[in-house]
Amino acid sequence: MIPARMGSQRLKQKNLQLLGGIPLITRAIRKCRDTGSFNEIWVNSEHPRFGEIATDEGVQFHQRPEALGNNQATSEQFVLEFLDKHTCDYLVQVHSIAPLLTAGQTRDFTRFVIDGGFDTGLSVVLEQIECAMGGKPMNFTFDRKTNSQELEPIQRITWSISAWRSITYKEAAHAGRCSTYSGKVGFFPIDRAAGHIIKTEDDLRMAESLLAMKSHP
């Protein structure tokens, strides 16, 4: 499932923005097709324009209620609405705004979740540097200086790709619990480029630079 709202506050119509001459939403669809891993591929949006794109690219379209396409709607709400209407064992959510996540990484992530028997799969970037929260050390101590390569990496969730076992997600949601982190949770490391999320114009420019670097190593 590829979620795509038409409205966005920081970067107008970000899912339709071009990267390397290709709209972000189209890149995501083609990436999912290239994995060869999915029984079905769905674009999930409140706006029919994305339905036209889905049809042109040979995938399916789920038009969520308009109320689930505004800035107040949460991911838990639109994921649940989708799962309540479509039967599946696992739902893999691939974000179009993480365009540098590759088809191979998408395939490996999906296999990691299923083979590991996880109910929830989250993509993470490993940050092996001193990290603090609320002014307190997380993976180091003020008592001594530790070389960064010796530190326990922090797992920074990126949301480039995530997955849920359908039955576990729905049971948690309908019971009023948090469904995003339900059941057995697995963390799948991806590189920083794959974890780059486009939310602003600066993010898009950075993605263009990273794409150019990947194309000309």
Image (cartoon, rainbow, N blue to C red):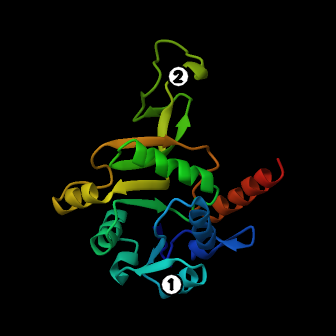
Q: Quadrant of residue 186?
A: top left
- How many neighbours does mark 2 have within 10 angstroms: few (below 14), some (14-19), or many (20 or more)? some
Marks 2 and 1, Cα distance to the nearest angstrom?
A: 46 Å
Height in image: 63 above or below 200? Answer: below
Q: Amino acid at mark 2?
A: Leu
Q: Badge 1, how many Cα within 10 Å: few under 14, some, many 20+?
A: many
Report the residue at 30% width, 60% height from top: 166
Image coords of residue 95 (percent x, y): 52, 62
Q: Is residue 35 left or right of residue 5?
A: right
The first of marks 2 and 1 along the sequence is: 1
Q: Which residue is mark 2?
A: 151
Q: Is residue 23 left or right of residue 213?
A: left
Q: Which percent across, then down, holds residue 203? A: 64, 59
Residue linked to disc 1: 51
Q: How many numbered markers are drawn?
A: 2
Instruction: Using the image as rendered, state which of residue 94 and residue 8 is in the foreground.
Output: 94
Q: Can you say which quadrant of the picture contains the N terminus?
A: bottom left
Q: Residue at x 58, y 66 (%)?
A: 33
Which of discs 2 and 1 lies nearer the camera? The answer is 1
Image coords of residue 58 (percent x, y)? 57, 79
